Image (spheres, helix red, strand yellow):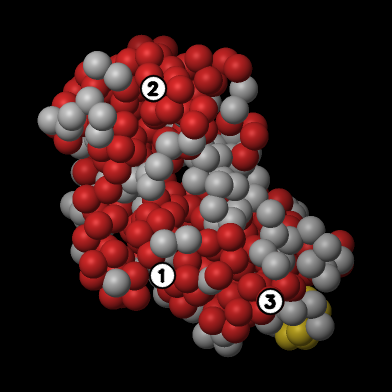
Amino acid sequence: MTEWTRTARVLRRAGFGASGAEIDAATSQGLDRWLDTALADAPEPTYPTITVIPPPADKASTAERQKYRQALADQGRLLLEWWLGRMLSSRTPVAERLTFGWHDHWATSISKVRFAAAMLAQQRTFRRTGLGSFTTMAKAMVVDPALMVYLDAQQNTKAAPNENLARELMELFTLGVGGGYTETDVKEAARALTGWRITDAGAVFEPKRHDDGVKNLLGVTGRLDAASAVDAILAAPAHPGFLATRWWRQLASPDAPPPDTLTRLTTAYGAGRDVRALVRALLVDPAFDRATGSVVQNPIEWVVGSMRTLKVATTEQSIRLALGTLRSLGQVPLQPPNVSGWPRGQAWLSTASAQTRVRAAQQLVKNADLTPVANASAAARTDALAHLLGLDHFTQRTLTALQTAKGNPAALAAIALVSPDYQVV
């Protein structure tokens, strides 16, 4: 594997796509220096203005209730289009890709939450804590209003504990299935998480609703609350390997990391639970290179990466084109199918999705900057296209398909976008 090819995979997996010119620049800079910049704290984005909308009164008319529902839907669309616009145009694509990764990890859907203000607050948490200590993130997330609504935590009281958040906290977010916890641990964690209520201002702790009795959670005994319950859970032996494997499957391969790689990742993560160090170690691990060609791009990666790579201008029209395509392909930001997040791998390669990607590719290339391909000689055109898309070559099978459109740069690009060479990284 050449340094250019190695760098290309890092850029394409850590962000959303990468053009040959971007890979050239990163290769010249050196991967270590590029990672220093890419994994630095990104500037705080300008967030959309989304205010809490008061619900209608008990005696409100049908029209007033419909107006309220429409206002909530409008805010949700505003937030979704804002985030898609950031994915498409941000100068810090790695920050957007990691934010999307955390959204998939702490999967929360606006379809149930309903309130865009809560989903936006969750976005702020991902961006503020996503490359810091996972301890800080986890303590923020167990009292995150959107996640609390999604997992019914507002129903968790001293008198009637609700175990949903406690169970998913261990099973999906921190330890994994078989992570060493028991049903008793779930019940004790639920007790520790009591006392939080959601208001227009966010999550508020009410001592009278909290069970302040002694709990025993994963061998830690005391009057545990939400924060100390997180400490007890993250101290469990299964946690570092679980989180490292989750991110490995996000960025590197659908398969679990090899044992030696997992050791290196958990060592980098360390006692401080340093996410930045974990992600960096993952991207430079030798096994990351060996996993090349194993990851099927999900629809968001494919649509956003294609539009960024082909320099499709970010406009209201292009954002809506991207959103329409994502709806057709079954993956819309802010709307994961369940608390486990989206599927991965072969699930995105159905016959129906292939036909949708063909149609989408034909639309995308209409507004693409194909100058490097159009200016290349006929003999060099496929090489120019491969470089534009961040590939070091096309396979013979793809070259054969491209021969049918060699005189048409747009048709060439559309074929390449749906080729296995481009879709599988």
Q: Is mark 3 on a helix, strand or loop?
A: helix
The amino acid at mark 3 is Asp
Residue 48 lies left or right of residue 298; in this view the side is left
In this picture, is 172 found above or below 317?
below
Q: In which quarter of the image is residue 201?
A: bottom left
Residue under the image location 55 percent in, 47 percent down: 293
Q: In terms of sequence position, does the residue under pointer 3 or pointer 2 come before the other? A: 3
User: Dot 2 surroundings within 10 Å: few (below 14), some, or many (20 or more)?
Assistant: many
Q: In terms of sequence position, does the residue under pointer 1 or pointer 2 come before the other? A: 1
Q: Nearer the viewer, mark 1 or mark 3?
A: 3
Q: How far apart, in angstroms, are the residues tagged by discs 3 and 2?
A: 41 Å
The amino acid at mark 2 is Leu
The mark found on residue 249 in the picture is: none
Q: Circle 2 sits on which residue? A: 402
Q: Circle 3 sits on which residue? A: 260
| Image mark count | 3
Residue under the image location 13 percent in, 30 percent down: 375
In this picture, is 77 found above or below 194?
above
Residue under the image location 54 percent in, 53 percent down: 292
Q: What element carries label 1?
A: loop
Q: Which of 115 and 356 is in front in this view?
A: 356
Q: In which quarter of the image is residue 302?
A: top left
Examine the rendering and report whether any part of residue 233 can be seen.
no
The furthest residue to the right? 183
Q: What element carries label 2?
A: helix
Q: Where is residue 182 in the image (x, y as percent from the top left)?
A: 86, 66
Q: Position of residue 219 (x, y in %)?
A: 81, 83
In this picture, is 384 found above or below 265?
above
Q: Circle 1 sits on which residue? A: 131
